[in-house]
């Protein structure tokens, strides 16, 4: 598997936009790529744009939660943006509420959230 | 097959689930049929998510298997059924496996229990040493 999800750097934020139906190994690779890119670049924030994602199952959900936790340990905050309403409904019914993951409705709002000083940590883990 | 009219209930597809790519393909096939069956967007999403969980279990715990997919009809309603079958180790304790949060691997233990919540009909047959078959159906409203 050579396919990888591109990670872009914009200012001190890493941006990942998921555009394809992700196979599990690509999801795991992305999680590792993000961890090393945070350290390499000293990024303070990670935005994962899932606007194009049609389903989030327990595997991808776990990746989002784990990535948020890893990046927090590496002094960066993760925001997941663009979740579709049907995806949110399904995730909650599946039993995954992603409590420790910050979300914003749009990319713009997500970037604003990261830019806001002193408000860059979620209340719970 | 070519002589048959496209009658719901007679169409079936079978794909093997032997790699991560097959799990992706299973999701795409289920979505395609759910759209044709005119399930609402939320119901499509629920069914595809359930299928993704079950296909992954078939691969990871069942050691691979097949998904059979088809339209079904009952009481004038149309639905989409997906059946996941493997000849793996089977599930020794179904109640335990269906419990939210129980996993024998490193998962979240939400796949089976969550899939059941996401669909209208859910049946599980399993025998230790011979395999597992799980069928899920979502009906168009
Ligand atoms: N096809 C199968 N064959 C054998 N055992 C299975 C099968 N499907 C599920 N199991 C067993 O049931 C348990 C629960 O499955 P479930 O999908 O709910 O959780 P998981 O796969 O462990 O984690 P998650 O799906 O949340 O990532 C599994 O850990 C496994 O032990
Ligand atoms: Mg599972």
Image (cartoon, coloured by chain):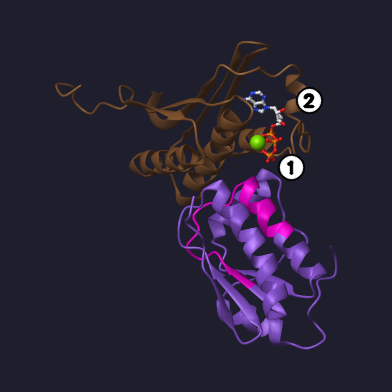
Chain colours: A purple, B brown
Q: Is A15 or A74 nearer to us in this picture?
A: A74
Relative to A24, does residue A109 appear above or below in the rendering? Answer: below
Name the residue rendered at 34%, 23% in the picture.
Answer: B9
Q: Is residue A39 left or right of residue A123?
A: left
Label 2, residues with CA under 10 Å away: few <14, some 14-19, many ≥20 = few
Q: Is residue B49 visible?
A: yes
Task: Please tell me in which quadrant of the rendered image residue B50 appears.
Answer: top right
Mark 1 C-beta to ligand 1 under 8 Å? yes
Name the residue rendered at 74%, 42% in the picture.
Answer: B108
Name the residue rendered at 54%, 34% in the picture.
Answer: B55
Label 1, residues with CA under 10 Å away: few <14, some 14-19, many ≥20 = some
Q: Mark 1 = which residue?
A: B108
Mark toward the viewer: 2 or 1: 1
Name the residue rendered at 70%, 81% in the picture.
Answer: A114
Q: Is residue A79 left or right of residue B9?
A: right
Q: Mark 2 = which residue?
A: B96
Mark 2 C-beta to ligand 1 under 8 Å? yes
């Amino acid at each position: 598997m050579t396919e990888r999800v591109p990670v872009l750097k914009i200012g001190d934020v890493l941006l990942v936009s998921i555009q394809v139906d992700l196979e599990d190994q690509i999801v795991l690779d992305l999680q590792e790529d993000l961890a090393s890119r945070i350290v390499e670049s000293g990024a303070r924030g990670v935005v994962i744009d899932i606007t194009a994602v049609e389903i989030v199952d327990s595997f991808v959900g776990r990746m989002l939660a784990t990535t948020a936790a890893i990046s927090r340990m590496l002094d960066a905050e993760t925001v997941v943006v663009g979740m579709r309403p049907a995806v949110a409904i399904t995730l909650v019914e599946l039993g995954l509420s992603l409590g420790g993951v910050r979300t914003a409705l749009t990319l713009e709002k997500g970037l604003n959230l990261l830019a806001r000083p002193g408000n860059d940590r979620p209340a719970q883990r | 097959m070519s002589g048959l009219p496209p009658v719901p209930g007679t169409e079936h597809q079978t794909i093997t689930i032997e790699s991560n790519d097959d799990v992706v393909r299973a999701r795409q096939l289920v979505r395609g049929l759910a759209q044709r069956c005119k399930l609402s967007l939320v119901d499509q999403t629920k069914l595809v998510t359930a299928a993704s969980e079950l296909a992954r279990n078939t691969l990871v715990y069942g050691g691979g298997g097949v998904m059979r997919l088809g339209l079904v009809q009952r009481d004038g309603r149309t639905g989409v059924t997906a059946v996941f079958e493997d000849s793996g180790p089977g599930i020794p304790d179904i109640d335990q496996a269906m419990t939210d949060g129980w996993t024998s691997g490193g998962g979240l233990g939400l796949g089976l229990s969550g899939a059941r919540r996401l669909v209208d009909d859910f049946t599980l047959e399993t025998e230790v040493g011979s395999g597992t078959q799980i069928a899920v159906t979502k009906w168009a409203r």
